[in-house]
Image (cartoon, helix red, strand yellow):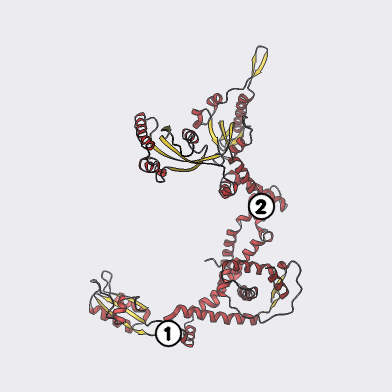
Amino acid sequence: MKKNLLLALMALSCTMPLVKTAATTPATNNTDDQVLLTIDGKPVMASEFLYIYAKNSESTEDRKSMEEYMDLFVNFKLKVIEAEDAGIDTTEAFKKELAGYRAQATPKYMKDEEAIDSLIRLSYDHMSRDRRAAHIAIQCPMTADDSTQAAALERINLIRQRVTTGLPVKKGKKTVQQPEDFFAVAAEVSEDPGLKETNGELGWITPFRYVYSFEEAVYNTPVGEITPAFRSPFGWHIAWVEEERPHSEVRASHIMKMVPQGNDSASAIARAQLDSIYTLLANGADFAEMASANSDDKGSAMRGGDLNWFGRGMMVKPFEDAVFALADGEMSQPFQSRFGWHIAKVTGHRPMQPIDSIYDKIAKNVQRDERGKEADKSFIRKMKAEYQLPDTMSDADVRAVADSHLEEKYTDLRHLVQEYHDGILLFDISLEKVWNKAAKDEEGLTRYFQAHKKDYTWDAPRYKGYVIYAKDKASATQAKSIIKNANPDSVLSYINTRINNDSVKFVKIEHGLWKKGQNAAADKYGFKDKAAEYTPTEDMPVVMVVGKVLKAPEVYTDERGKVTSAYQDELEKAWIEELRAKHTVVINYDVLNELKIKN
């Protein structure tokens, strides 16, 4: 359970006049950093009070004045001091719990937000410009030895020379260089097996669909030029940036008939089916209804064929070419992709969305890919510079140093951790002094109920006792005798051992405090209400009751929840009086009054 200071403060505080005050001291201009009060000479800063006051004011409709909150705040701080005096803050359980809450709060402070924002905006810039590219790859795993790495790099650089300046070739007495066709070279040497059939053509590149080093190389190279050699986890690459267009998106729906690749007869059947569907659509059939009934793409069929918004590079090329050539509301002829046959209908076009509308989405993508590592590296560099740490220090140690300075660096975190600290202590000490103490104090609860019995009334009588359901009268009578003579805590145990057995349950009992309408059997047999609608079951046809009708509670257990709560309030009030008498509280009213003016 999270011991939230704010909730505990509202739930536990008891408003009492401040009984000990002293002469105030002048406040400086920076009121938030001044001592607002002292408890036994220990200062409490105005900023801590303001933090609690602001959070409580936002989280409750019962907005209290600063004077009222000051009273609650003092009560709260006195309880925390009592917990510290009891040594609760020195226990391993407390330290572990506080560390757990702090660990949940600190991650957002252990980031280079400027670097992350810069990466988000750079990503948005890339997203706003679709680039078409082709590439050549030489495979080389990251685990390869140095000589293998060097050989792969030498090969890709030689390939780059072939497609940029060309290799030197002697023609007679002259040496000439002529760039070779990129796609021809890709077909000859590229080790990307997935792209050999397209000679290296990738189509449209969009951010987050390729490793960051690939995207960065493509977007950092002018259109029409070939990138320098660059590394990816798969090996070495060069890419030719063929074209750039402003990013736009299309929303389309489709009807698809799936065809296994290479199955010509299935393809012919699918084409014929779509031709028939196309004729129906051309004659006015509803596209969404036809998609739901006929499309083999079950995911989009559930939405009437809708594929939502997508940009270039998100779909296979035949599909992309077809839909981006259509105007809003226009429908394509049947066309084929490697998945089968399609009819597509475009329902909208839109340009690049504003950055504010997709900032958070981009941020998540940045954190998930290599960009996130770039931001982490920037954070480490800044921390080393800020705390003058050696370059040789490990990232983990740098983070540990940065973590140790967070509270002094970030006021909001310092207050939050203090809130966790005090909230845990408040919860634990209140559990000991009030909640558990009240729940276990049977004599105190009885004494309190008897002294305040007139405060506990009912709007209608209650039946208090047992309802016995039995297979036969003898079993019911035996159960009734046990209830009348046994200790109430042992009734169920005796019935199960003396009447029931493992294979047959002869008796079932209910114990409670019911008003009319809450238990049909109690209505009929306890209240003796002839109009009560209750019929015994065939399995348990005999019903008896043991108990009585009460007009008002006779013991505290008849209103246990209300009496326990009220008794807790009485214990807390006495505890606060004790704390007020035990500790000296001095409030700086000059500071408090200035806070009232500012807030």
Residue toward you, 15 or 481: 15
Quadrant in which the C terminus appears? bottom right
Q: Which residue is mark 2?
A: 398
Q: Amino acid at mark 1?
A: Val
Q: CA distance from mark 2 to mark 1?
A: 64 Å
Task: Determine whether, in the image, residue 554 is placed left or right of residue 242.
Answer: left
Number of residues whose C-alpha sits closer than 10 Å to that of mark 1, classed few (under 14), some (14–19) or many (20 or more): few
Task: Say what secondary structure mark 1 lies in.
Answer: loop
Picture quadrant where residue 107 is located? bottom right
Q: Position of residue 596 (x, y in %)?
A: 68, 71
Residue 90 seen in the current view: no
Position of residue 170 in the picture relative to residue 437 (left or right): right
Q: Is residue 316 above or below residue 582?
A: above
Looking at the image, is mark 2 or mark 1 earlier in the sequence? 2
Amino acid type, label 2 = Val
Q: Is residue 303 visible?
A: yes
Secondary structure found at label 2: helix
Residue 424: numbered disc? none
Please provide percent x and percent y for residue 369. 57, 44
Which of the two residues, 353 or 2, is positioned nearer the viewer here? 353
Residue at image location 58% in from the left, 32% down from the top: 243
Residue 69 pos. (x, y %): 63, 73
Tell me the tag on residue 555: 1
- Residue 129, image quadrant: top right
Towards the viewer: 207 or 87: 207
Q: Is residue 1 above or below residue 509?
A: above
- Please identify the quarter of the rendering in which residue 220 is found: top right
Q: Position of residue 569 (x, y in %)?
A: 53, 79
The answer to which of 461 and 93 lies nearer the viewer is: 461
Label 2 Cα neighbours within 10 Å, binned few <14 / some 14-19 / many ≥20:
many
